[in-house]
Image (cartoon, rainbow, N blue to C red):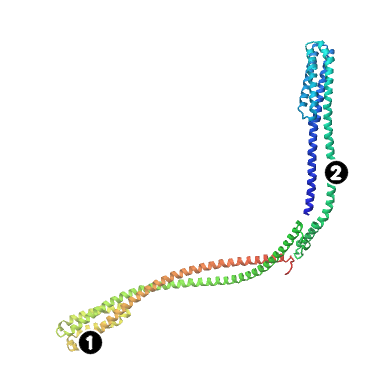
């Protein structure tokens, strides 16, 4: 195909070059014919005609009947001479072949002699009314010198016609050669077109028909129809490259469709798994949301209980503080009782010396016993034993007051009893001190319990808020899972549609 295109291009170049060369040569000849030959002949004719008209005007002098007509005649004669001179000057400026230079010089000399020595002097004689000179010049010099000028001018005119005829013959010869060359090239083009038709039919049309058949099968979804390019394996023209490109495109399209089919099947399976996973996740999310709702309800109840425990702990701490104060006061009272019992013990040793004042001591003892009973009553359960002791002390004091006379006899026994009572009171004081320490410890523990309850209440409140937020997030996750499930179903439908669309293509199986 490249050779045919090159041949056609060469023929077109030859025809075009020949036409351009012929046209240029013909145009040059036509230009020369017009500018040199035709224009030169025209200028010579103008010169001759104007000179003849000037002679005619001079000859018409005899028919002039008035001075005005004479003036007009002379004016016209001068105008004719000027026009002739202008035409001759323009002719002299034209290109002149070397062979015509001598003719041009001879004609110019004859013309100058005619105009300067005959025609213009005759016109001047008329202007001066010198009729003798006028008639002499007009009858002798003017016709003779004009004949000489005309004889010298004819070779120039014939040469111009000869040059024009030669250029015309050259143009005709070139035209004939161009016609023969164009005819030969046209015949060669016809032969070459017949050859090109066969070559193009074998190298271009048939492969294109096979390619069109393959494209039609591909449009119908059949990608398995192969394009046979083995017969053109040795060719490297454009058609062979096109066939190889079509075969490569078909192979690439088969691979692409196969990959798309495999990918669509994989996408369809994956979307089904995603849809199933989303459904399972949605169910578990709903269950988790329900569990979180129950947890939130339980946390609210636990918060209420912890708050109630914190309130009870604060009340218990307050009561423990009160009990601690009472225990401290009881310890102080017991301390005073211990001191009093010590004094009684000392007094019992000296009772023999101070028996006179026993009634006063009994009275004071009675008062102290009464105070001890009151403090024991305030101590509650802890002071019950002390109340009993205080009651006995009061009874002893009363009996001492009523039986002061008998105390001497019983002093020995009383001293022993007082000594034992002092021991018991000392032990009671120790117990009361331990109770005070224990109550203080209980008070501290209750304070710690109250603080811990407050912290637990605050922590449970935070946990309750976190559970509430988790419940909200879980509900949002449930909504998102539902949306994801819907999107997965839509993706599955699209993947199925893609799989059905790709399944319309038939490809070769490896």
Q: Residue at x 84, y 31 (%)?
A: 162
Q: Position of residue 74 (x, y in %)?
A: 79, 15
Q: Position of residue 375 (x, y in %)?
A: 28, 77
Task: Using the image as rendered, state which of residue 431 and residue 235 is in the foreground.
Answer: 235
Element type where label 2 sits in the image:
helix
Would you identify the image quadrant in which residue 35 lies?
A: top right
Return the mark for residue 417: 1
Question: Badge 1: how crowded within 10 Å, few (<14), some, or many (20+)?
Answer: few
Would you identify the image quadrant in which residue 329 lies?
A: bottom left
Return the mark for residue 180: 2
Q: Residue at x 77, y 20 (%)?
A: 82
Element type where label 1 sits in the image:
helix
Is residue 382 found left or right of 85 in the rendered image? left
Q: Position of residue 414 (x, y in %)?
A: 21, 87
Q: Residue at x 77, y 22 (%)?
A: 85
Is residue 328 found left or right of 308 in the rendered image? left
Q: Is residue 98 above or below residue 355?
A: above
Find the distance from the CA under tag 1 to the CA under tag 2: 176 Å
**Which quarter of the rendering shows the C terminus?**
bottom right
Is residue 426 found left or right of 138 in the rendered image? left
Q: Is residue 56 visible?
A: no
Dot 1 and dot 2 residues touching (CB under 8 Å): no
**Which quarter of the rendering shows the N terminus?**
bottom right
């Amino acid at each position: 195909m490249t050779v045919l295109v090159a041949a056609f291009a060469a023929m077109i170049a030859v025809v075009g070059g020949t036409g351009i060369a012929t046209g240029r040569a013909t145009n040059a000849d036509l230009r020369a014919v017009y500018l040199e030959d035709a224009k030169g002949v025209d200028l010579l004719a103008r010169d001759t005609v104007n000179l003849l008209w000037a002679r005619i005007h001079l000859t018409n002098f005899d028919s002039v009947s008035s001075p005005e007509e004479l003036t007009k005649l002379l004016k016209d004669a001068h105008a004719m001479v000027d026009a002739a001179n202008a035409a001759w000057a323009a002719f002299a400026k034209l290109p002149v072949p070397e062979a015509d230079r001598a003719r041009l010089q001879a004609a110019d000399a004859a013309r100058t002699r005619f105009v300067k020595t005959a025609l213009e002097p005759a016109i001047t004689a008329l202007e001066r009314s010198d009729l003798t000179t006028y008639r002499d010049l007009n009858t002798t010099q003017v016709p003779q010198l004009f004949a000489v000028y005309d004889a010298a001018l004819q070779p120039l005119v014939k040469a111009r016609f000869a040059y024009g005829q030669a250029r015309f013959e050259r143009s005709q010869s070139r035209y004939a050669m161009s016609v023969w060359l164009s005819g030969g090239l046209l015949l060669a083009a016809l032969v070459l077109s017949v050859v090109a038709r066969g070559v193009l039919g074998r190298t271009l049309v048939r492969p294109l028909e096979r390619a069109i058949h393959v494209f039609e099968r591909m449009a119908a979804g059949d990608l398995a129809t192969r394009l046979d390019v083995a017969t053109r394996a040795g060719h490297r023209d454009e058609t062979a490259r096109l066939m190889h490109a079509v075969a490569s495109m078909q192979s690439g399209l088969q691979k692409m469709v196969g990959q798309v089919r495999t990918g669509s099947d994989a996408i369809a399976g994956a979307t089904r798994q995603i849809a199933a996973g989303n459904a399972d996740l949605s169910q578990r999310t709903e269950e988790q949301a329900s569990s979180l709702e129950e947890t939130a309800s339980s946390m609210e109840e636990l918060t209420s209980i912890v708050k109630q425990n914190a309130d009870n702990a604060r009340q218990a701490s307050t009561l423990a503080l009160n009990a601690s104060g009472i225990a401290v006061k009881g310890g102080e009272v017991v301390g005073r009782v211990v001191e009093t019992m010590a004094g009684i013990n000392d007094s019992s040793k000296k009772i023999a010396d101070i028996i006179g004042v026993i009634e006063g001591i009994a009275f004071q003892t009675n008062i102290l016993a009464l105070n001890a009973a009151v403090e024991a009553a305030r101590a509650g359960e802890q002071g019950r034993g002390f109340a009993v002791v205080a009651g006995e002390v009061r009874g002893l004091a009363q009996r001492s007051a009523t039986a002061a006379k008998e105390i001497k006899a019983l002093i020995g026994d009383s001293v022993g009893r007082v000594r034992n009572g002092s021991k018991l009171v000392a032990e009671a004081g120790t117990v009361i001190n331990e109770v005070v320490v224990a109550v203080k410890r209980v008070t501290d523990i209750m304070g710690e319990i109250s603080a811990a309850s407050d912290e637990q209440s605050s922590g449970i409140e935070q946990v309750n808020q976190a559970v509430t937020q988790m419940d909200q997030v879980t509900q949002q996750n449930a909504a998102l899972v539902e949306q994801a499930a819907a999107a997965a179903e839509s993706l599955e439908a699209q993947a199925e549609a893609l799989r059905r669309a790709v399944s319309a293509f038939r490809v070769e199986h490896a």
